[in-house]
Image: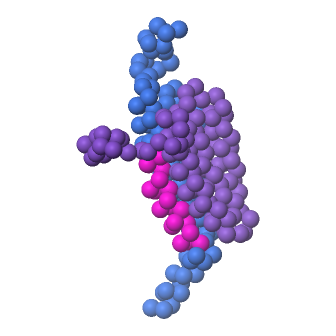
Chain colours: A blue, B purple
Amino acid sequence: MSDLLANLYNFFEMVRYPSGSALCLAGAILCVIGTIGVMRFPDFYTRMHAASITDTSGATVILIGMALMAPNWIIVAKLGTIFWLLFLTSPAASHAVVNAAHTAGLQPLIGRLGKKSDDEEGAA
Amino acid sequence: MTATALIAILLGMVLLLIRTLIGPTLYDRVLAVNSLGTKTVLALGLLGFVMGRPEFLDIAILYAMINFVSTIAILKFFRYRSFQVPLVRRGGAQGGKR
């Protein structure tokens, strides 16, 4: 039994740095995808949809990868604190931004893709 | 690989800075700054792991707190044009009369 546990521990010690690095890279790629969405989407509300990819999956995957690479338990506790703060505050901040935009009267873009809506053509 | 992840996040921060500069409305800029703060937290953590000093996570915790508060403060300022306004609605059903 202790043999099996020692083998499992050795396997975990061997595999945690490569898997942690791979998870960090995957999360960073998710962040870049979300940022490209923020750059290219046509509307504020669709941009918010793209930015939430960074806030949820990108941050979670990167934090899990860093927790796999952590040298001791203090670092894991700090990473858990960061995850808890982001988990609580980023939906609240997103809701506050969208609610402020909606209250201020910002209309979503309606119409076919690649074509300006009638309101903008009438305004221009 | 961790350094590659850090470089990718820095690239994303540069793209978000461009969105902050050219954003057509005010709320695009606020959204970009908020997302930039989240990316800064992740970049600080990854920088600590790349340099072999994970103590940088303390700064990342502080930045995660300040990011949320600054976003709410910016939105409140653009709504009321002042910081000296209570966020409770006056004369409402729960607010009561003052």
| Foreground of the two, A100 or B46 | A100
Q: Is residue B90 visible?
A: yes
Q: Is residue A34 visible?
A: no
Vertical side of B68 occupied by A3: above or below: below
Percent from the top left, x then y, of residue A75?
59, 72
Give residue B93's quadrant in the image. top left
Determine whether, in the image, residue A103 is placed left or right of residue B61: left
| Foreground of the two, B73 or B53 | B73
| Foreground of the two, A63 or B90 | B90
Range shown magenta: A75-93
Quarter the C terminus of chain B occupies: top left
Outermost front residue: B98
Residue at 45% x, 91% y is A1
Instruction: Decide whether residue A78 is among the magenta residues.
Output: yes
Outermost left residue: B93
Instruction: Decide whether residue A120 is among the magenta residues.
Output: no
Vertical side of A36 occupied by A9: above or below: below
Percent from the top left, x then y, of residue B2?
67, 59
Determine whether, in the image, residue A22 is placed left or right of residue B85: right
Vertical side of A106 occupied by A12: above or below: below
| Foreground of the two, B2 or A83 | A83
Vertical side of A14 occupied by B33: above or below: above
Percent from the top left, x then y, of residue A14?
61, 75
Determine whether, in the image, residue B45 is placed left or right of residue A3: right
Magenta region's main secondary structure? helix
Give residue B12's quadrant in the image. top right
Residue at 47% x, 62% y is A84
Quarter the N terminus of chain B occupies: bottom right
